Amino acid sequence: MTILAGIDEAGFGPLLGPLVVSSCAFSITPELADQDLWPLLRKSVGKTRSGLRGRLLIADSKKAYKRAEGLGHLERTALAALGTLGERPADLATLLNVLCPDCAPRIWDYPWYAASRGTAIPAERADTRIAAKVFAEDTARVGANLMGLTCHCLDVGHYNAMVERMKNKSQVLFVTTTQLIQKLLDRFEGQDLHILIDRQGGRVHYREHLLRSFAGMELRIVQETEQRSAYELRGRSRKVCISFTVGADGRHLPVALASMVSKYVRELLVESMNRHFAGLSPDLKPTAGYWQDGLRFLKDLREQLPEVPLDRHRLVRCR
């Protein structure tokens, strides 16, 4: 069997809230490595919001999520995917311990997250349970079984420290991505991997970065174009294919699922931040954390809560 993995992020651009980078891994038969999984799994998943008929929506999170509608499809898909892995978190603390146990202790050190540790995750509804069962059966039928979901949640303080050390937020994203790749290499030791990643900024050439990150492996450039950069790494009798593709979350189901899980975790934490500050000032309008509205939110905090000390290093991103 071969491991097919997707990696994507949510929250690279905002002023407030965490950057979340996630990976999802499927165990597949080798011939599926280059195939589009959406049509193969059409009994259980859909790529668009219309015509789902009970199936799971797996799509670029920017298309799957509408703020006015709430967490909706993000939550349903993330919880169904976790359910196929035997995980049914009852609250936010359990969810983060499942998805990003290494990051959770940092998260709970923030007052605007700590109070939400016990926030309930909705119980698995009947339609979600059925959708998860159909998804598990469908993936087993085609030979593409979901094996794992993992997140790296970069809280603002940790993110700022990384940016200060690396002097470049794009490098922060790349390093976090390589950490997830390394987790895949460690977990699926000895197995071939195909890892699909969304293009990171305008970068086309990744050779030197990959060689530094995986110094013990030989690297071959397969392709470097404006649309796709692909590489083959070999070491210890295994092959690892890594590609960075423009719009990968719309082209590859594993990347889309990673995108939705990242967005789900980020939105839960942004909700926690809003809930904390609203408890101190009920008239405070919530924020999604993006730059313009984030600046408005900070201005409102200063005006409505002048007596509350704010640690900007842990609340506001440096870039």
Image (cartoon, grey):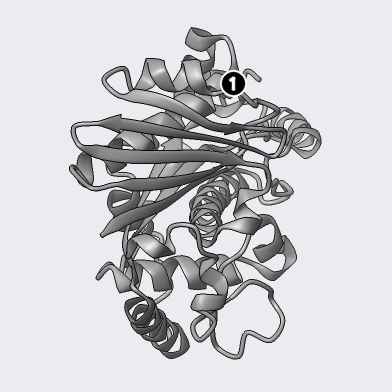
Question: Relative to 38, is 108 on the left or the right?
Answer: left
Q: Residue shown at 51%/86% (left/top)? A: 43
- Characterize the local packing of mark 1: few (<14), some (14-19) or many (20 or more) Cα atoms within 10 angstroms: some
Question: Relative to 279, is 31 on the left or the right?
Answer: left
Q: Residue 9 in the image: x percent, y percent?
A: 55, 43
Quarter where residue 133 is shown = bottom left
Q: Residue shown at 51%/68% (left/top)? A: 37
Q: Residue 310 in the image: x percent, y percent?
A: 57, 24
Q: Which amino acid does label 1 sit on?
A: Lys
Q: In this view, does 286 lie above or below 302?
A: below
Question: Relative to 127, is 140 on the left or the right?
Answer: left
Q: Residue shown at 57%/47% (left/top)? A: 270
Q: Badge 1 is on which residue?
A: 169
Question: Relative to 259, is 139 on the left or the right?
Answer: left
Q: Residue shown at 44%/27% (left/top)? A: 220
Q: Residue 245 in the image: x percent, y percent?
A: 62, 42
Q: Residue 145 in the image: x percent, y percent?
A: 32, 69
Q: In this view, does 70 lie above or below 159?
A: below
Q: Is residue 100 above or below residue 64?
A: above
Point out the image quarter for the C terminus. top right
